Amino acid sequence: MIPRSAPDEPAFIATNAAASRIGDPAARARLLALVVTAVTARTGRPPRLVEATGSATLEAAIAAARDAGAPLVVVVGGDGTVRGAARLLAGSGIPLGVVPAGTGNLLAAALGIPRAPRRAAAALATLSPRTIDIGAVTIHPGAHPATPDDAGERFTVACGAGFDAVVMAATSRDAKRRLGVGAYFASAARLIGDLHPIHFRIEVDGIELETDGIAALVANCGDLVPGILRPRIPLDPADGLLELLVLRAGGPLGGIRATFELLAARAPHAPGVPAGRSLRVRGRRISVMPDPPVALQVDGDPYPAGWFTASIMPGALRVLAPVAAGAATLPEAGEP
């Protein structure tokens, strides 16, 4: 059952002032004016707005808006801000609006939300709530077995182990502000000579497999290059499943070939049957155990070396987004 909003509670806007694309105060003020106008048009009353540079402050404000029964929460920021809001709003029925203002903007790209902040702000007035899955991930530092470091983490797009996590950790905030998504490509080019195969032990819904590769991702949705390069078979964020994606080749050339093989694949592999230079398997609960432990990432945020277990939370989040073919939309909280 979708909870109804409090009749007198306004919508809420949370803005990460440290996001890479809104660092200039004047530009940020102009963008927020557009967001406020769109949300006012949508809800019929001016929203509340909080600007902060720390995730703790923003998440506390989002939690308060959720508990007060806000009819809508909008975040203006990057992937980390979106992920924090998704974790807090999961299961609440309150729609999440996204104005992408960071570097990767992975969820926005995956759902077709305009990646230009001003266009995304204007779209808030008319986009419909779309129900999607999110992932829950338990991070285990060090070798398997280990005590969980964080059993309450969530992800909207993907978590992974290996080269992608190394690239995320090596990309500085300053580089992201200067180069945008190109900062990740610059880091990858600098690090690609150090590529070497990693041995992965993997479990997908109780089926075990072992393989070598340079990276293993567990994805809910997303593109290889946000909004530009995506698999032939899209990752569906509303199918109740996670996708394991492994680049099985080692070395720079093998990694490139594995990437294009994965993009071109016409069907997932059967669990436990690695084939070719890449592997794609679907499941509801997936453990990735690199041996030895390697760097991890969750929606682009780096974590220390270890392993992880991810599981799906079907239909846990409502997001204002263009309607995908066959996707269901729901009324706003408070509407019949």
Image: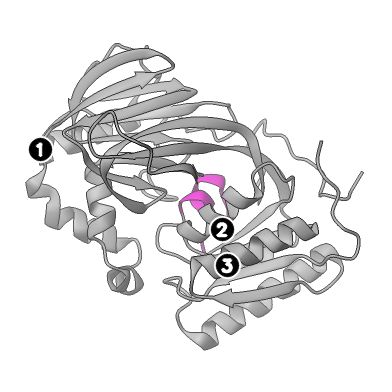
Q: Amino acid at mark 2?
A: Pro
Question: Of discs 1 and 3, which sits in the foreground?
Answer: 3
Number of numbered labels in the structure image: 3
Residue 241 position (above or below residue 320): above
Q: Amino acid at mark 1?
A: His
Identify the residue at image location x=47%, y=62%.
78
Mark positioned earlier in the residue sequence (3 or 2): 3
Horizontal side of 325 relative to 94 (left or right) equals: left
- As drawn, the label of residue 114 is 2
Mark 1–mark 2 distance (CA, rounded to whole Å)? 36 Å
Q: Are marks 1 and 2 in contact (CB under 8 Å)?
A: no
Whether the magenta-drawn stretch holds residue 112 is answered as yes
Q: Amino acid at mark 3?
A: Leu
- The x and y percentages for residue 256 are 19, 38
Q: Are marks 3 and 2 in contact (CB under 8 Å)?
A: no
**Magenta span:** 106-118
- The x and y percentages for residue 124 are 70, 61
- As drawn, the label of residue 58 is 3
Identify the residue at image location x=11%, y=42%.
195
SS category of the residue bearing label 3? helix
Residue 124 in sight here: no
Question: Of discs 1 and 2, which sits in the foreground?
Answer: 1
Residue annotated with mark 1: 196
**Where's the N terminus, which quadrant?**
top right
Horizontal side of 97 relative to 260 (left or right) equals: right
Q: Quadrant of residue 307?
A: top left
Question: Of discs 3 and 2, which sits in the foreground?
Answer: 3
Q: Quadrant of residue 263?
A: top left
Identify the residue at image location x=29%, y=54%.
168
SS category of the residue bearing label 2? loop
Majority secondary structure in the magenta region: helix
Horizontal side of 306 relative to 312 (left or right) equals: left
